[in-house]
Amino acid sequence: MAIKLKSKREIELIRRAGAVVRQVLERLGAMAAPGVTTAMLDAQAERLTRELGAQALFKGVPGRGGPFPGTSCISINEQLVHGIPSERAFRAGDIVSIDYGCRLDGYCADAAVTCMVGKVPQEVRRLVAVTRRMLDMAVELSRPGPLWSELAGRMQQYVEGEGFSVVREFVGHGIGKEMWEDPKVPNFVSPDASGRDFRLEEGLVIAVEPMVTMGSREVVVEADGWTVVTRDGKPSAHFEHTLAITADGAEVLTA
């Protein structure tokens, strides 16, 4: 791995990009209501990105389904990640995961949030709360010294103890001048991942993004080549923050 530690100046620049990310996510989350389409949210994300002088990270990223067409990824219910904005409208009882990243003045930030539309069943609300808590644990436990696997193991144990599943196919990542940098940041511990473990140290900036499902952890990619859904069709949730490791712990750069 070629992990690039960041200077205080670089962390401040990532924080500025993170402020744009948070503003966009807050606006889109406030818009998510019955009858509103995912395309309407994405149009707002594109407009805000332009107004704030930033560059959207996701639009045009190459993939099996061709270049990603949206400024944001918007995924509903059983859709885990990489949902393509469309004319699909939200309905009361939906949960929607919104993932957005931008580059500002040469540095990137990335975050995601799962919102609830109207009255959501209690067990689905609990899924969202547990996934959010998993991210909060990462923030609380991060500090210079421990191996990431120590944190990931506690996060995984918590989620599985609540009766939910942690997705294995998608993980967090380092971030800085590029959206995806080393290291890979899993939300679980795998016996074959020991060679890719890393130690938390001051100056490390990572995007931590737990993805949790209500049923099986197995996922598949839909025919569009982008949208990832749970194999059993049960709901999933996704939260993400960009974090900087400091001498005092973790600082959230997308809050």
Image (spheres, rainbow, N blue to C red):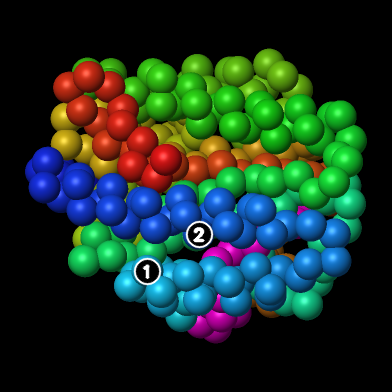
Residue 112 visible in the displayed image: yes
Write down the residue under mark 2.
24
Give the numbered dot on residue 85.
none
Q: Which residues are magenta?
A: 65-77
x, y (%) of residue 30?
Answer: 66, 53
Q: Quadrant of the C terminus?
A: top left
Residue 59 in the image: above or below residue 74: below
Query: Residue at position x 81%, y 35% from top?
Result: 124
Query: What SS does tag 2 mark?
Result: helix
* Foreground residue among 117 and 237: 117
Query: Residue at position x 41%, y 74% from top?
Result: 51
Left or right of 57, for residue 204: left
Left or right of 230, for residue 226: left
Give the numbered dot on residue 52.
1
Query: Residue at position x 72%, y 19% from top?
Result: 162
x, y (%) of residue 195?
Answer: 30, 35
